[in-house]
Image (cartoon, helix red, strand yellow):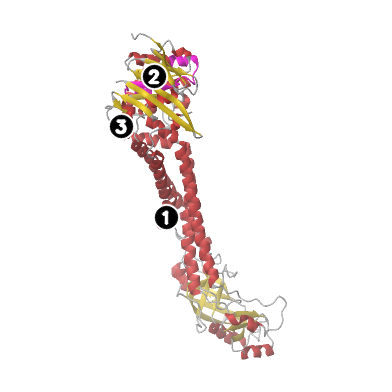
C-alpha cells in the first residue's frame, strides 16, 4: 500500500507526466476522431455508392425545332422538353406534429433530374408524385423552427415518407393569377452542398416534370423556361451533345462519379486512420521511451537500495498504470466533450456531409487501445527488457 | 559480518583494449571501523566500492560476505544483501526530486517486509538522528547540498545495515558540510557499523580507522589506527 502511495505521489508531482498526458490526449483525439471520420464517412460513401445514379441530363436554353426533332429521333434520348423555374410555396401543416408551423419557399430543381440520394431512394422516371429534398432542407432559417430549443439534431430520416403539399402559382395568358396544389411524398434526400444547390431545392422525376408541364405549359406566359434533354444512359452524353448547336464554352454536363473515385475515397479514409494511428502510436511510444530512459538512473538507484528487479518493474508498471488511468479519465472527458460539441453545436455542419456524426463507444475504445494500452504494454516490455539479466549497474559511473 | 575480497580483479574493455582497474585486490572489511579509500582519479576506488556494494561484477577472485561467495548468489539473494546489510551513499545524493525528505527515506523501506510498525515514524526518527526532523516535509530542491547528503545517509541507514558505503559523499560539499557528514559517518562507525568511504579529501584522515590507497588497481593499507 505504501508503495502505491509513494508511486502515486511521485507520479502526480512530476510535471513531465502531465506533459506526457497532454501529448497522449492529443494523440488520442487525433486517433479517435480519425475513427469517427472513417466510421461516418465510409457510411456516407457506401450509401452514395449504393444509391449512385449517374446524371443523364443536359440543360440547355431554348432549343430550335430542328434540333428538337433531331434529338427526339436519336435512340439514346428519352426525353426532350421544357420546364419552368417558378417560386412555389409549401404548406407545412403536414409537419405540425414534428414541431413545424409555417411555410417555406420552394422551387423546382433546374439542373439535375436524377440526383443521387444519400438517404431514402432515388426517383425513377415513373414516380410522378415523389420528390427528393435537400438534406439540410429542414433545419433551415426559413422554417419557423428554433434549433436551440431542440434537444437533438432533427434527423431528416423522420421526414421520409411524409407528404408535402406544394402550392403552385403562376400568371396566365389572360393576366390572371392561377394556382393549383399538388401533394408529393418525400422519398429521399440529396446532398445539396456537393451538388452546389440551394438548400430549398428539390427534385422531381421525369413524369413529375411532365405532369407539371402539362398543367402549366398551355396557358403560362412565363419566359424563363428552359429545355432539358434526358438520356437513356450517361455514356451517350458526348454523342448526343454533338447534335446540339455550337455554344461557346460548351454545355454543362453533369459529372459522373466513377467507381474508382469511390475507391480513392476509401483509400483516403483508410489512410487517414492508418497515418493517425501510426503517428499517435509512435509519438506516445517515443515519449514513454524517453520517460523511461530519463528514469533509468532512478531505477538503478533502487537496485542499490535493495530493490529486486521484480520490485522495480512492479513500481514502474504501477506508475505507468497510474498514468494510464489518468490518461483514460482525461481522454474520456475529452471524448465526451467532443461528442457533446459535435452533436449539439456542430450537427448542422456534419449534416452537410450527409450524416449526423455520432461518437461511438467503439471509437473511444479503439483510441484508448492504440494511444494508451498498446504503447504502455510495449513500455512495460521495454522496462522488463532493460533490466534483462544484467548483474552490473553502470549508471553509477559518472 | 565481514566483507572479504580475495584476489579480486576487474577489467574493463574499451576500444578492444583491456584496462585493468583492480588487480588481485585482497582485503577484509570489518564492522565498527571507518575505512577511507583514497587514490587518484581512475585508480579504481569507485569500482572497488561498487563491487563491495554488489553493484558491479568482477572477472576474477572471490568476494565473500559472511563466508559466502557473492558470485554464487542469485539476483534475489544479492538484492536482499543490498537491502539489509549494505547502505549506499552517492556523491550526487540521488534523492527522488518528487518525494519529500521523509518519503525519500521511506523508499528502501517499502520493499523491506522485515520492518514492522509505522514506516513514516521510523523515517522521521532517522531524519531526527541526522538533525533534519524540521526539514522532513521539504523536497530535495528545498534543501542545501549538505542537508540532501544527510537525507541520503538517513536513507542508507533506514534498513539498519551492517555497512554503509559512501562514494565521494562530500565531493559536492563545502568544508563545513563535509565535516558534518564525516562526523555523522564516524558516529555510525562508533555505533558498530562498518563505514567505507571513497574520498579525495585529506580531511577524512582524522576520522578514518583505516586508510586504504588504490593506485593502478593495487590496494595497499596506508595507515591503520589501533581500534579503540
Query: Circle 3 marks a residue in which chain?
Result: B
Task: Find the distance from the CA under tag 2 to the CA under tag 3.
Answer: 23 Å
Q: Mark 1: few, some, or many residues within 10 Å (few <14, many ≥20)?
A: some
| Quadrant position of the N terminus of chain A in the picture | top left
Q: Horizontal placement of A358 versus A238: left or right?
A: left
- Residue A209: percent from the left, percent from the top? 56, 83
Q: Nearer the viewer, residue A41 or B77?
A: B77
| For discs 2 and 3, the disc positioned in front in the rendered view | 3
Question: Mark 1 sits on what residue?
Answer: A366
Question: Mark 2 sits on what residue?
Answer: B196
Q: Mark 2 or mark 3, which has the lower sequence index?
A: 3
Q: Tell me if residue B176 is in the magenta stretch.
A: yes
User: Label for residue B73?
Assistant: 3
User: Label for residue A347?
Assistant: none
Q: Mark 2: few, some, or many residues within 10 Å (few <14, many ≥20)?
A: many
- Residue A328: percent from the left, percent from the top? 41, 47
- Residue A202: percent from the left, percent from the top? 55, 74
Q: Horizontal placement of B21 versus B77: left or right?
A: right
Magenta segment: B153-181
Task: Find the distance from the CA under tag 3 to the CA under tag 1.
Answer: 46 Å
Q: Are marks 2 and 3 on the same chain?
A: yes
Q: Tell me if residue A360 is in the magenta stretch.
A: no
Residue at 50% from the left image edge and 68% from the top image edge = A45
Amino acid at each position: 500500500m505504501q508503495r502505491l502511495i509513494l508511486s502515486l505521489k511521485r507520479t502526480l508531482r512530476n510535471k513531465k507526466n502531465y506533459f506526457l498526458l497532454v501529448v497522449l490526449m492529443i494523440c488520442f483525439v487525433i486517433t479517435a476522431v480519425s475513427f469517427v471520420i472513417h466510421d461516418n464517412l465510409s457510411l456516407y460513401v457506401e450509401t452514395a455508392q449504393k444509391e449512385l445514379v449517374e446524371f443523364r441530363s443536359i440543360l440547355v436554353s431554348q432549343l430550335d425545332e430542328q434540333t428538337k426533332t433531331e434529338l427526339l429521333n436519336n435512340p439514346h434520348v428519352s426525353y426532350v422538353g421544357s420546364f419552368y423555374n417558378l417560386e412555389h410555396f409549401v404548406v407545412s401543416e403536414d409537419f405540425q406534429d414534428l414541431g413545424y408551423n409555417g411555410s417555406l419557399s420552394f422551387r423546382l430543381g433546374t439542373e439535375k433530374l436524377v440526383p443521387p440520394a444519400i438517404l431514402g431512394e432515388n426517383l425513377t422516371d415513373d414516380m410522378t408524385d415523389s420528390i427528393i429534398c435537400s438534406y439540410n432542407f429542414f433545419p433551415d432559417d426559413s422554417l419557423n423552427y428554433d434549433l436551440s430549443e431542440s434537444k437533438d439534431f432533427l434527423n431528416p430520416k423522420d421526414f421520409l415518407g411524409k407528404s408535402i403539399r406544394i402550392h403552385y402559382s403562376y400568371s396566365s395568358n389572360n393576366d390572371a393569377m392561377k394556382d393549383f396544389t399538388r401533394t408529393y411524398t418525400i422519398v429521399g434526400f440529396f446532398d445539396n452542398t456537393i451538388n452546389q444547390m440551394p438548400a430549398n431545392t428539390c427534385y422531381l422525376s421525369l413524369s413529375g416534370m411532365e405532369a407539371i408541364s402539362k398543367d402549366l405549359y398551355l396557358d403560362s406566359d412565363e419566359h424563363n423556361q428552359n429545355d432539358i434533354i434526358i438520356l437513356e444512359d450517361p455514356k451517350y452524353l458526348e454523342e448526343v451533345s454533338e447534335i446540339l448547336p455550337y455554344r461557346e464554352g460548351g454545355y454543362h454536363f453533369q459529372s459522373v462519379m466513377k467507381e474508382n473515385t469511390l475507391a480513392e475515397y476509401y483509400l483516403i479514409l483508410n489512410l487517414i486512420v492508418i497515418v493517425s494511428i501510426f503517428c499517435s502510436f509512435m509519438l506516445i511510444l517515443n515519449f514513454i521511451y524517453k520517460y523511461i530512459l530519463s528514469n533509468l538512473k532512478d531505477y538503478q538507484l533502487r537496485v542499490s537500495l535493495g530493490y529486486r528487479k521484480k520490485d522495480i518493474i512492479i513500481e514502474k508498471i504501477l506508475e505507468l498504470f497510474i498514468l494510464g488511468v489518468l490518461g483514460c479519465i482525461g481522454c474520456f472527458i475529452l471524448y465526451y466533450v467532443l461528442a457533446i460539441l459535435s452533436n449539439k453545436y456542430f450537427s448542422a455542419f456534419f449534416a452537410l456531409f450527409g450524416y449526423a456524426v455520432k461518437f461511438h463507444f467503439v471509437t473511444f475504445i479503439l483510441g484508448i487501445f492504440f494511444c494508451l494500452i498498446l504503447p504502455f504494454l510495449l513500455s512495460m516490455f521495454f522496462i522488463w527488457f532493460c533490466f534483462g539479466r544484467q548483474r552490473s549497474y553502470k549508471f553509477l559511473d559518472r | 559480518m565481514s566483507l572479504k575480497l580475495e584476489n579480486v580483479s576487474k577489467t574493463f574493455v574499451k576500444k578492444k583494449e583491456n584496462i585493468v582497474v583492480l588487480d588481485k585486490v585482497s582485503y577484509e572489511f570489518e564492522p565498527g571501523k571507518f575505512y577511507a579509500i583514497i587514490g587518484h582519479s581512475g585508480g579504481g576506488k569507485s569500482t572497488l566500492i561498487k563491487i563491495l556494494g554488489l553493484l558491479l561484477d568482477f572477472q576474477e577472485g572471490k568476494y565473500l560476505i559472511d563466508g559466502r561467495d557473492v558470485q554464487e548468489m542469485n539476483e534475489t539473494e544479492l538484492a536482499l544483501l543490498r537491502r539489509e546489510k549494505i547502505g549506499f551513499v552517492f556523491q550526487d545524493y540521488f534523492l527522488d526530486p518528487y518525494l519529500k525528505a521523509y518519503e525519500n527515506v521511506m523508499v528502501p523501506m517499502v520493499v523491506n517486509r522485515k520492518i514492522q510498525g509505522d514506516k513514516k515514524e521510523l523515517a522521521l526518527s532517522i531524519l531526527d538522528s541526522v538533525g533534519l526532523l524540521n526539514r522532513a516535509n521539504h523536497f530535495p530542491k528545498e534543501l542545501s547540498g549538505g542537508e540532501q547528503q544527510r537525507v541520503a545517509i538517513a536513507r542508507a541507514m533506514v534498513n539498519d545495515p551492517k555497512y554503509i558505503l559512501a562514494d565521494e559523499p562530500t565531493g559536492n560539499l563545502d568544508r563545513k558540510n563535509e565535516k558534518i557528514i564525516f562526523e555523522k559517518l564516524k558516529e555510525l562507525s562508533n555505533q558498530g557499523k562498518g563505514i567505507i568511504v571513497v574520498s579525495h579529501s585529506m580531511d577524512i584522515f582524522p576520522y578514518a580507522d583505516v586508510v586504504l590507497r588504490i593506485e593502478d588497481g593495487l590496494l595497499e593499507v596506508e595507515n591503520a589506527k589501533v581500534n579503540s
